Image (cartoon, grey):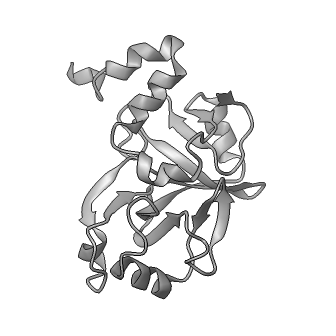
């Protein structure tokens, strides 16, 4: 369901017209925060070649790291669906939480109490200043949809997630579902 109003917890789907932008071409972003001062989100469908163990050797796990966006790519962020296990988490919406006590999180991963269906790590985030995201919406850069997956989106999204979302939109978007990522190379 396409929406006109920005609310945290929604998904931003990159319009097919965003071509050549390495960060946002075929991106699906979970909007983690939105208010009068700006917006923050995480690209949820762009895995990197790193695992959490590559970045933090004392975490014994092969959980993938995702490119969260072009801002502060030297910082690690995470979302999860287990606020009862990770203290100091901030609810985004629909049972999805942002951050929390990292020492507890490390211990929970190492003991197998949380897994890839419960947590997702990102290098960087996507950020917009006051009214910047609305300007991009007005320029038809993004499609806003509800997060129908709720907190299960953490384990659901994949590299093909953009195509799946475009296919769900149907109509004029269907033609883009099988188009090459860079039509200029076609």
**Residue, far right:** 36
* Residue 39 visible somewhere in the drawing: no
Q: Which residue is at 29% across, 86% downward?
A: 58
The image quarter containing residue 177 is top left
Percent of width and height locating residue 154: 47, 54
Query: In x, y percent, where is residue 112?
Result: 36, 75
Q: Is residue 85 left or right of residue 25?
A: right
Residue at (36% x, 44% y) in the render: 158
Nearest the camera: 71 or 109? Answer: 109
Q: Residue at x 56, y 78 (%)?
A: 86
Counting from the top left corner in percent of width and height, residue 176 is at 39, 19
Q: Position of residue 76 (x, y in %)?
A: 43, 72
Dividing the picture into quadrants, the one containing residue 22 is: top left
- Side of 141 relative to 3 (left or right): left
Count the marks: 0
Q: Name the side, left or right, on which 170 lies relative to 185.
A: right
> Can residue 156 be seen in the rendering of this structure?
yes
> Where 9 sits versus 76, above or below?
above
Q: Residue at x 52, y 36 (%)?
A: 13
Closer to the camera in the image, 91 or 41: 91
Figure check: 151 above or below 57? above
Q: Name the image quarter holding the C terminus.
A: top left
28 is higher (above) or lower (below) than 155: above
* Image quadrant containing the N terminus: top right
């Amino acid at each position: 369901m396409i929406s006109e109003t920005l609310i945290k917890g929604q998904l931003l789907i990159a319009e097919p017209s965003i071509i050549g932008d390495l960060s946002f071409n075929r991106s699906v972003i979970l909007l983690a925060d939105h208010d009068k001062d700006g917006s923050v989100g995480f690209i949820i469908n762009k895995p990197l070649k790193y695992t959490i163990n590559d970045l933090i050797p004392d975490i014994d796990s092969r959980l993938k790291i995702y490119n969260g966006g072009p801002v502060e790519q030297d910082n690690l962020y995470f979302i999860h669906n287990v606020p009862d296990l990770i203290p100091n988490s901030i609810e985004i919406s629909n049972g999805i939480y942002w951050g929390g006590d990292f020492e507890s999180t490390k211990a929970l991963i190492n003991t197998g109490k949380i897994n890839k269906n419960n947590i997702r790590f990102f290098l960087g985030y996507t950020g917009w200043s006051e009214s910047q995201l609305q300007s991009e919406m007005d320029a038809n850069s993004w499609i806003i949809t509800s997060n129908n997956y709720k907190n299960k989106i953490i384990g659901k999204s994949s590299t093909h997630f953009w195509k799946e979302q475009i296919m769900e939109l149907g109509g004029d978007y269907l033609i883009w579902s099988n188009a090459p990522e860079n039509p200029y190379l076609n």
